[in-house]
Image (cartoon, rainbow, N blue to C red):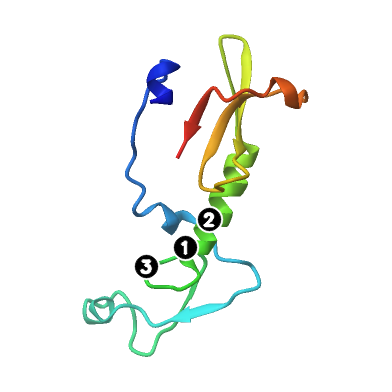
């Protein structure tokens, strides 16, 4: 309803695999065997082990690694349109929701211009 009242445009993106772009924490060493199909096709040797640098499906830390990576990226994101600079500000009440605000040091002028959910 708020989007309708403020005449915001609404869109959606499927991010089901996005967490696979997240780096794993530097202090974490994850070693795995390659998939059996890789060995069968000669893409990996029997007994070979791989060190993971990015999150993968099924790894317990993957969703958390994605959340940290996403939040760090969103916090540093700034852009300009029509001569005005914008940035994302994480909501205090729900950390999964990000407000689009004008990029200013004046906290009183940081009105919500849009939401990223």
Mark 3 secondary-structure assignment: loop
Element at label 1:
helix
Task: Farthest residue to the bottom: give it.
Answer: 47
For the C terminus, the image quarter is top left
Residue at image point 66% right, 72% down:
27
- Quarter of the image containing the N terminus? top left
Which percent across, then down, holds residue 40? 22, 81
Q: Residues within 10 Å of mark 1 (few under 14, many from 20)?
A: some
Q: Residue at x 58, y 56 (%)?
A: 68
Q: Considering depth in this image, is 31 or 100 the residue closer to the camera?
A: 100
Q: Secondary structure at mark 2?
A: helix
Mark pair 2, 1: CA separation: 6 Å
Location of residue 95 with respect to 98 vertically, above or below:
below
Vertical order, 57 against 93 (above or below):
below
Q: Quadrant of residue 25?
A: bottom right
Q: Nearer the viewer, residue 67 or 43?
A: 67
Q: Which mark is residue 25?
A: none
Residue at point 56%, 53% (across, down): 69
Separation of marks 1 and 3 at Cα, in angstroms: 9 Å
Give the residue number, with chain letter if any, for mark 3.
Answer: 57
Nearer the camera: disc 1 or disc 3 = 1
Residue nearest the viewer, comparing 82 with 34: 82
Q: Is residue 36 above or below residue 63?
A: below
Neighbour tally class for label 2: few under 14, some 14-19, many 20 plus, Cα within 10 Å: some
Disc 2 to disc 1: CB gap under 8 Å: yes
For disc 2, the marked residue is: 67
Q: Give percent across and percent down for residue 19.
A: 44, 56
Question: Can you identify the residue that label 1 sits on?
Answer: 63
The tag earlier along the polypeptide, 2 or 3, is 3
Against 19, is 12 above or below? above
């Amino acid at each position: 309803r708020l989007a309708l009242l403020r005449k915001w445009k609404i869109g959606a993106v499927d991010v089901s695999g996005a967490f696979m772009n997240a780096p794993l924490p530097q202090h974490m060493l994850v070693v795995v065997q390659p998939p059996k199909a890789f060995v069968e096709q000669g893409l990996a040797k029997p007994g070979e082990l791989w060190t993971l640098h990015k999150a993968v499906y099924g790894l317990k830390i993957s969703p958390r690694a994605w959340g940290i990576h996403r939040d760090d990226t969103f916090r540093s994101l700034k852009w300009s349109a029509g001569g005005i600079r914008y940035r994302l500000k994480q909501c205090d009440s729900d950390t999964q929701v990000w407000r689009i605000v004008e990029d200013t040091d004046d906290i009183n002028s940081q009105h919500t211009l849009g939401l990223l959910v």
